Image (cartoon, rainbow, N blue to C red):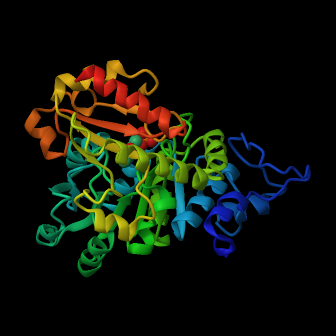
Amino acid sequence: MEKDQYRPETNAVRIQTEKTWQMEHSTPLFLTSSFTYDSAEEMRATFADETDNNIYSRFSNPNVDEFVRKVCSLEQAEDGYATASGMSAIFASFMALMNAGDHLLSASSIFGSTHTVITKFLPKWGIEYTYFDINKPETVEALIKPNTKMMFVETPSNPGLEVVDISLLAKICDKHGVILNVDNCFASPVLQKPITLGAHIVTHSATKWMDGQGRVLGGVVVGRKDLIKEIHTFCRSTGPAISPFNAWVLSKSLETLHIRMARHCESALALAKALEGNPLLQWVKYPMLASHPQHEIAKAQMTAGGGIVCFELKGGLEQGTRFLDALKMLTLTANLGDSRSIASHPASTTHAKLSNEERLKVGITPGMIRISVGLENAQDIIDDINQALEISK
Ligand SMILES: *Cc1c(COP(=O)(O)O)cnc(C)c1O
């Protein structure tokens, strides 16, 4: 198969839509809602699934296919479907694979909107859920019920950078016939390939590291062929399709994903090391620091620590807002995984509506700052954070 032809970095560059008669080098944009046929017979055969021809861009499109083929190659997945955002990929993976009466077992440290889908919407359709503590994977098996259909986990988790052993969860899921769904957004397939560790499907917000430049929204779900077929059937009719333009941008972005991730990881490790031991901080968290609680697991299943570094300000909630105001270069914005470094303070922003106790349950302490390390010179990033720490103390 094409996806195994070269090494991953090369596949991310070389997997490409077939050239048109113009012999272009770079894949053109296929901005078209639908596709045409030369004959009634060809059209009939296409609708009967007897050809690989495209029909309508809600179902498939050459730019979208190219992006999906690359992600499948990078994730070592059999098949995939791309969506308009990470949330639509996650939502589709839930709705297509679970029925009323089924049970979802999910880690509690997950992205805010995923938490909303699980707690506010799934129960409306009779899908129940249980949260488990990602730091206590030994408690997970006992939470499986006869109707448990899926296990969902993010590793490293957003924003707390908690790490869980994917192969351990995969063994438990296989024993009980449960689908293991891993949100691999924080690691990207460059650093971690959950399918090779036993996950059945992998979901992504392509908005983050895959785009890497803060331009477009996108999502993708890849995995076992029979599961993706269900997801494709669901999406084809319900319409969360990605724009061909966004897919084109994202496919181009994947060509540089490996070199970008290498730089993000190198600078993030440098920042984590520079901050560790700073007397103004309670702690610094990064998967590749020996002090990370799951450092051994991170080392075993990730090739590097990723681009996010977290730390806790000794001055708590109040210092958090002072710290953001004191930054000169880092951006205050809701995104992550950008070429520009970003700082966020979850307790005063994304998680401000929760009580202190609720925040602690999902790993968010009052003075926690999350840094998405960009592609600027690492020393400029470190200098800006250090001067803001001094001013805000
Ligand atoms: C951002 C994010 C999502 C949601 O993705 P969108 O593209 O914003 O819809 C899901 N999971 C994680 C871990 C994220 O960081």
Is residue 87 in sight in this rendering? no
| Residue 352, position as x, y percentages in the image | 20, 28
Q: Is residue 215 visible?
A: yes
Q: Nearer the viewer, residue 259 or 209?
A: 259
Q: Residue at image x 42%, y 31%?
A: 383
Q: Nearer the viewer, residue 23 or 303?
A: 303
Question: Quick one: 296 or 203, which is closer to the camera?
Answer: 296
Quarter occupied by residue 216: top right
Of the four image quadrants, the one with ligand 1 is: top left
- Is residue 269 positioned above or below 226 on the image? above
Residue 22 appears left or right of 207? right
Residue ranking furthest to the left: 357
* Residue visible at 43% across and 20% down in the picture: 328
Quadrant housing the C terminus: top left
Residue 89 horizontal/vertical position (percent): 44, 50
Q: Quadrant of the N terminus?
A: bottom right
Q: Position of residue 43 (x, y in %)?
A: 74, 58
In front here: 256 or 249? 256
Q: Position of residue 281 (x, y in %)?
A: 22, 37
Residue at horizontal 47 percent and vertical 67 percent from the top: 223
Q: Kindly give the residue lying farthest to the bottom in the view shown.
A: 175
